[in-house]
Image: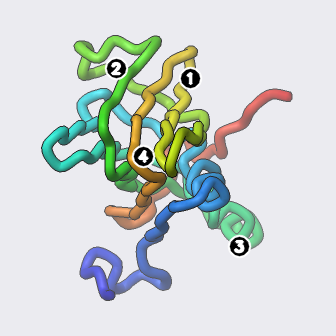
Amino acid sequence: MTDARFSDAAEGPLALRAETPEDLAVIAALVQDAVLPMSEISWEAKARRLALLVNRCRWEDLAQAEAEGRPFERVQSLLVVSDVTGIASTGIDRRDRDTVLSILDLSWEPGADGAGRLIVTLAGDGAIAASVECLSVDLRDVTRPYRAVSGRVPHHPD
């Protein structure tokens, strides 16, 4: 599949699907330190879908960028959780649409018969929990990569 937004790029957009906890660990690593305003979270109850438009670090390109002396890059990506039966949040004010959230991790809490909860852990002790019938998460880049404004790679103190 060719995406016109990436037609002149060396590589096409990242597109991944997680249907197992191991797959989810890969997506979790790629969205670590992603940021998004509350206004970019969409819960579509009728479609049973939770969508987050995130600004993420391009962790998958970091080593090559450093080796080539290129600046660190970010990209906007769409994180979609399917088969959602309900959502809940803690530690965030959902009414403040300008609040910027930072993703720390994605995790899976299995339930009965393949159902469970996908937990989006946020900085500042916040979390979004999506109750789902089965684990189904998609991550897809929706813009070309661009230079990180700060030019720095996020750093976590030990």
Residue 97 x %, y %? 24, 21
Q: Amino acid at mark 1?
A: Ala
Residue 55 badge:
4
| Nearest the eye: 103 or 45 | 45
Label 2 residue SS? loop
Mark nearer the viewer, 4 or 3:
4
Is residue 33 positioned above or below 15 on the image?
above
Mark nearer the viewer, 3 or 2:
2
Label 4 residue SS? strand
Residue 149 is left or right of residue 83, and the answer is right
Q: Which residue is mark 3?
A: 68
Label 3 residue SS? helix
Residue 77 x %, y %? 39, 55
**Around disc 3, counting alpha carbons within 10 Å, would you say few (fewer than 14), some (14 to 19), or many (20 or more)?**
few
Q: Do the residues under discs 4 and 2 have CB atoms within 8 angstroms? A: no
- The residues bearing labels 4 and 3 have C-alpha atoms spaced at a distance of 23 Å
Q: Residue at x 27, y 37 (%)?
A: 40
- The residues bearing labels 3 and 2 have C-alpha atoms spaced at a distance of 36 Å
- The residues bearing labels 1 and 4 have C-alpha atoms spaced at a distance of 15 Å
| Nearest the eye: 23 or 142 | 23
If you read the primary sequence from the N terminus, does the residue marked by circle 1 or circle 3 appear first? 3
Residue 37 x %, y %? 33, 30
As drawn, the residue found furthest toward the right would be 158
Q: Which residue is mark 1?
A: 123
Q: Which residue is mark 2?
A: 99
Residue 97 is left or right of residue 92, and the answer is left
| Nearest the eye: 114 or 149 | 114
